[in-house]
Image: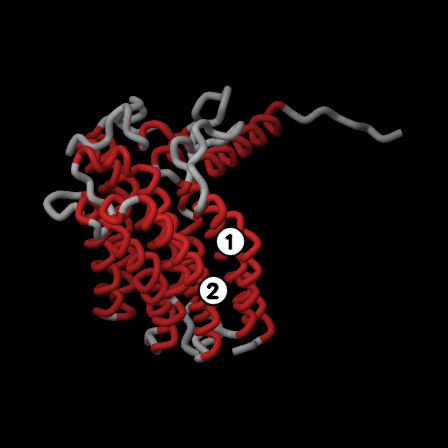
Amino acid sequence: MTDVRPPSAEGAAVQGRLSAWQEVLRTTNPPSGRPLDPVSRWLVLTRAAVLPMTLVAGAVATLLAVRRPDFRPGLLVLAFVGLILAHTANNLMNDLFDVEVGLDTSTYPRALYAPHPVLSGMISKKGLAAGALLVNVVDLGILVVLAVYRGWPVVAFALAGFALSFAYTAPPLRLKKRGLGEPDVFLVWGPLMTCGTYYAAVGHLPWEIWAASVPYGLLCTAVLMGKHIDKAPYDAPVGIRTLPVILGEARARTATKGLMAAFYVTVIACVAVRALPWPALISLFAVTKLVPSWKALSQPRPQEPPPNFPVWPLWFAAVAFVHTRRAGSLLVLGLIIAAVANIR
């Protein structure tokens, strides 16, 4: 007779924590009906649910670099960790600067789709600033090590990424306010992340990597466009002139659909010029998510959120994110196949 024992209290606690972390990463919100443990709290504060966008950018660079004879895995790991920390610091700084200038309020979308770190009482402004500073200091330590091995180019990539991330919401530039936030995101999640990580791992940067960084950068920009379409009714009255506010909703929706379609065009072009290996064409199967995404962008926004929809009042951001997640995952899968089969 099989001895079936109930799970131990310790095992149940571990399973509960893992379930809580998974829920935060899926919804950006605290786990329902459970107290916040320290890890869940950090994941909520840093909006860790959107970190997969950075993971994909780093994965693209990794898989393009891994077969190069001068590939240095240790430096790649450092650069990859640096990317995640940079995105984490960016999220913390954005919340800090937006609440400091009075943009984030209890009625602004940032405080509606997930708890705002300061406005919800989870942490003070000083605590949020300290967290951002700590993450940036650790990231600076990684940069120093990479600079010793790779020299000034890796410093240039890192400082350019930091400057653009800082200026996105911080005075006096506040690029988001001037219709420059969307190009900012394209540059950071496209060329800077992918090319910077590749250079750190390999030590040189052929033109093909610049080209290969474009498709995923377009997808990340589409997500931000969707988010800013959702926020346009809140942004326009307070003078936040994001690109959707400048273009108007109809043209902004069309532009977002164009960015999504441009991903497929640029992947095909990169394969044609051998900037990407041909298995990257697997990402074209993400068209199964493109079609419903385009349909949603062509229809009126629903008046009420669907059942269990976690990030309302964001709608078009979620539409674009689902497509980006599928297309980015398939792109990485194609690059994994190419790396394993040694296909160039």
Q: Nearer the viewer, residue 195 or 289?
A: 289
Q: Quadrant of the N terminus?
A: top right
Closer to the chain start, of discs 1 and 2, is 2
Q: Is residue 27 visible?
A: yes
Dot 1: few (<14), some (14–19), or many (≥20) neighbours within 10 Å?
many
- Most extreme residue toward the left, as rendered? 172
Image height check: is 238 above or below 164?
Answer: above
The residue sitting at 50% across, 56% down in the picture is: 327
Give amino acid for label 1.
Answer: Leu
Dot 2: few (<14), some (14–19), or many (≥20) neighbours within 10 Å?
many
Residue assigned mark 1: 290
Q: Is residue 129 visible?
A: no
Q: Find out whether the residues at labels 1 and 2 contact each other: C-beta distance under 8 Å.
A: yes
Task: Report x, y in % for residue 172.
Answer: 10, 45
Q: Quadrant of residue 155?
A: bottom left
Q: Is residue 72 left or right of residue 339?
A: left
Image height check: is 295 above or below 205?
Answer: above
Residue assigned mark 2: 264
Task: Report x, y in % for residue 189.
Answer: 34, 57
Task: Report x, y in % for residue 102.
Answer: 17, 30
